[in-house]
Image (tube, grey):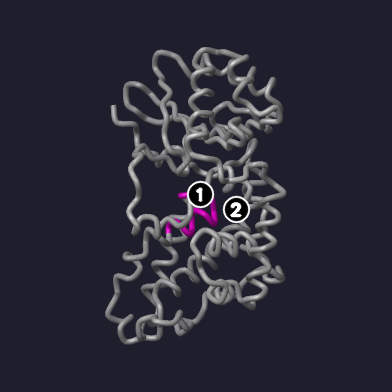
Amino acid sequence: MIDDQDPDRPDAPAAPGTPGPPGAPAAADASKAPDAFEVNRRYLGSVAYRLLGSFTDAEDVLQDAWLRWQSADRTAVADPRAFLTTVVTRLCYDQLGSARARREAYYGEWLPEPAVSYAAGPDSPDELAERGESVSLALLAVLEQLTPAERAAFVLHDVFAVGFEEIAASLRRTPDAARQLASRARRRIKAGSRHAGDTDPGEHRRAVEAFAAASTRGDILGLMDVLDPDVVWHADGGGIVRAAARPVHGADKVARLVAGLVGKWFTPEYALDFALVNDEPGLVWYERATGTVTGVVAFAVADGRITEAYTVVNPEKLAGINPITL
């Protein structure tokens, strides 16, 4: 829990009567929608995941938010979605304070839990609205550098297009202060990441394919061709699975590290395949017999070369990933 004296800490969730945006349903109408939480569950889960970088923590927040929704005076709620967003934001805010302490004591480097999908088809408009703008694993890792208030303002505004009036109500700030938080977050993200976030998907895919091909051959020179000279390799084994405890810097070191892992990755019991990792081309390796995913790699790509690689092998962070269909 964040200390009460923390100047960035919002107060308890807003009163149920917090005004909604123009066109919001009347309070009497809101009382007829007891399933509003379920209607917005996927959206709220997406908000919580992007604020926390953990599906496990996000689910805990949703459970708490559901309890608060059950006890709320819904006749006084003008806009259930806005009310629930405020509740989830503030619960996440408190989670971020305790999560930071836990992550500082974490064995090795802490990385966000990856979101893995295998379908390449376009999302429906409803799915896009529920998920907000795509947030790569690389960006989620950089968000760890922000204060809770900066992260909340950035995620709500830049990812989910929530207005600053609503963000200000969630954070107990003025709209100008909320706008400044988001602006400061963007500057810190730009300073803390070499990944511009606007890489062409085809270029990203080609870099990942080249990496996979060179890796399976144990081809150090081929890896050097696709790795940026200043590439950084991040790994998260959580102290459960062996992984580099600190980031590895430089194309030569990363190429040799990957080549050395080939013997472990590509035994007859395991296979490597492509997947979308947080909506970007990435790699998964899995048990051939069951399809169970045992590792995920996400990449940041710029100018056709890999600038960052994020490898998650902590089984606790992979447990929720659906097996590959064999």
The residue at the point 35 percent across, 82 percent down is: 25
The percent position of residue 1, horizontal first and vertical second, equals: 61, 62
Q: Badge 2: few (under 14), some or many (20 or more) residues near its Cα, within 10 Å?
A: some
User: Seen in the image, is 19 located left or right of residue 121?
Assistant: right
User: Seen in the image, is 265 located left or right of residue 40?
Assistant: right
The percent position of residue 267, horizontal first and vertical second, equals: 44, 14
Report the residue marked by disc 1.
54
The percent position of residue 295, horizontal first and vertical second, equals: 48, 30
From what the image shows, is residue 26 above or below residue 255? below
* Front-lying residue, 83 or 319: 83
Q: Nearer the viewer, mark 1 or mark 2?
A: 1
Q: Which residues are magenta?
A: 45-55
Whether residue 315 is visible here, answered yes or no, is no
Report the residue marked by disc 2.
99
The residue at the point 36 percent across, 73 percent down is: 70
Asked if labels 2 and 1 touch by Cβ distance under 8 angstroms, the answer is yes
The percent position of residue 284, horizontal first and vertical second, equals: 44, 30
Q: Badge 1: few (under 14), some or many (20 or more) residues near its Cα, within 10 Å?
A: some
Q: Amino acid at mark 2?
A: Ala
Question: Magenta span: helix, strand or loop, mainly?
Answer: helix
Is residue 151 found inside the magenta-colored segment of the image? no
The residue at the point 37 percent across, 58 percent down is: 42
Q: Quadrant of residue 74?
A: bottom left
Using the numbered discs, state the Cα–Cα distance from disc 1 to disc 2 in whole angstroms. 10 Å
